[in-house]
Structure formats: structure tokens, C-alpha cells
Amino acid sequence: MRRAPVFCALLLLLVQTTAHAQQAQKEIDNGTDPTKFTTSAALIYEYNDLANGLARQAPRVEVILPLGKQRHYNLRLTVPVVSNDVAGNDHFALGDVALRMSHVFGVTRQRGMVVHGEMLFNTAKRDELGTGKDVFKGTFIYARFLHGGAIFAPALVHSLDVAGDRDRADVDITTIDFYYVPKLKDPRNYITWDPALNFDWANNKDYVSVAVTFGRTVGEAFGGHAQVYIKPSVLAGSERPGDWSMEVGFKVLGF
């Protein structure tokens, strides 16, 4: 009979440990909810298949820092190193550095809204590695939290040059993005869908793009949790600037 209390205590301990492990697993923040601001750092490699058999490569570093106690704001810095063989020089050099401020507001159980204000600075070391312009990029996101845990967050994005080389092409682009995140059984895995309509007003061109991201949290690293992802994209339409692109990345979130 004395073994019964010991057995019950061990069983209770096992149940509590399992519950804590499941809770920790459920609380993994994989960065797919646009209304959740979390600290992150990423190493990313992007390959773009351009028109006429040309290619662009752009490894970059991204760092995101939430601001304030309630984390209603964050700041993102993006530093790319670019190679573009359009001019016959495929060596890597600094591209256009970007700085973005974001604000989340109006968050309820059903929805949330986010605005981004981003400046892409004319820092590229060679003409073909950037736009030759200082570009402001504004974004409005309306996120809906759907039944079952999925997220639908369409966004309106507009990029407009505000300064720079007058001899370079103007930047005036609108993108309507239909971001969707299904809820997966394993919280360590995630998928995002990004079909988008793109309108290049400066060059009187428009095209469609679709990107799909496959990611997985792989463990703890540097005081946060690490994830890897792959993001293939395809472009459609006779006026598209290229055919496809591929992005792979390693991120650490929540450190």
C-alpha cells in the first residue's frame, strides 16, 4: 500500500511535466503573425531569375527590435550584399540599406492592424545593385484571425522614390498582397501563402506573383528559438520582370 502514494506522486509529476512541455511547444512564436512583434535576427540568401537570362543574388542580414513595454512598435534594419550580372559584373557589393518602423494597433481576438513606414536608402556601390533612389515604402495590413487558428492578412503596399539620381528610373509601385497562414498540427512547422498583384506605375507594367514559405523551428539558439525556411516564388504575366526567385534563411526569434 505504501507504493500507491509514491506511484501517484510520480504519475502527477509526469502529467505536469508533459503539460508544461506541451504548453511550451504551443507557445512557439514562429513570426508568421504580423501583429506579434518579437526580437529576431536573420541571415537570408535570395536568388532572382531575371529577364533575358540574367540573375540577381542578394544575401542580407535583418534585425528586428520591438520598442516599448507593450511592444506596439518595432524597428527593422536590413543590410543586403548584392550581385547583379546585368552590367557584366557579378561581384558582390553593398546594396540599398533599409530601415523600417512598424506599429500595431486595434488588436482584438478577431483582428489586428499594422502599419509599416520604411526607407530604402541609395547606398548601393554600383548602379545595377540598387534603384539609384531614396525610396519610401508604406504598408497597411489588416489581419483577421480565423476559426481554427489560421490568419488572413491582406496588405496594401506602395513604394515611391523621394530623392536620388534624376537620370535613374522612377520608383512608383503598388502591391496588393493576400497573405494567408494555415494552422498546422505541429506548431514547430509553418507555411505561408503570398499571392500578390503588382502594379509598376512608372513603367506602365503589371504582373502577378505567388510566394510560398515552408519553415520549421529547429531548437534553441542564442537565448531564443531558431528556425530555417525556404521561400520559392513565381511571377506571371507578359510584363513580369523575371520568372522565379528562391529565398532561404536562418532566423533566431525571441532572444
Image (cartoon, helix red, strand yellow):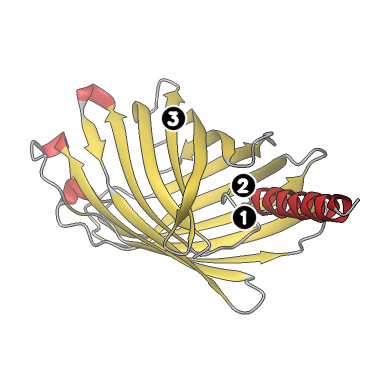
Q: Residue at x 38, y 58 (%)?
A: 62
- In the figure, is residue 159 to the left or right of 181? left
Q: Would you name the residue on which mark 1 appears? A: 140
Q: Would you name the residue on which mark 3 appears? A: 233
Residue 154 x %, y % = 65, 43
- Cα distance between the residues tagged 2 and 3: 18 Å
Q: Residue at x 60, y 79 (%)?
A: 68
Q: Residues within 10 Å of mark 1 (few under 14, many from 20)?
A: some
First in sequence: mark 2 vs mark 3:
2
Q: Would you name the residue on which mark 2 appears? A: 155
Helix, strand or loop at mark 3: strand
The residue lying furthest to the front in this view is 1
The reply to whether residue 205 is visible in this rendering is no
Amino acid of disc 3:
Ser
Q: Are marks 2 and 3 in contact (CB under 8 Å)?
A: no
Mark nearer the viewer, 2 or 3: 3
- Cα distance between the residues tagged 3 and 1: 22 Å
Amino acid of disc 2:
Ala
Amino acid of disc 1:
Phe
- Cα distance between the residues tagged 2 and 1: 6 Å
The residue lying furthest to the right in this view is 1
Helix, strand or loop at mark 2: strand
Q: Nearer the viewer, residue 83 or 5?
A: 5
Q: Nearer the viewer, residue 36 or 118?
A: 36
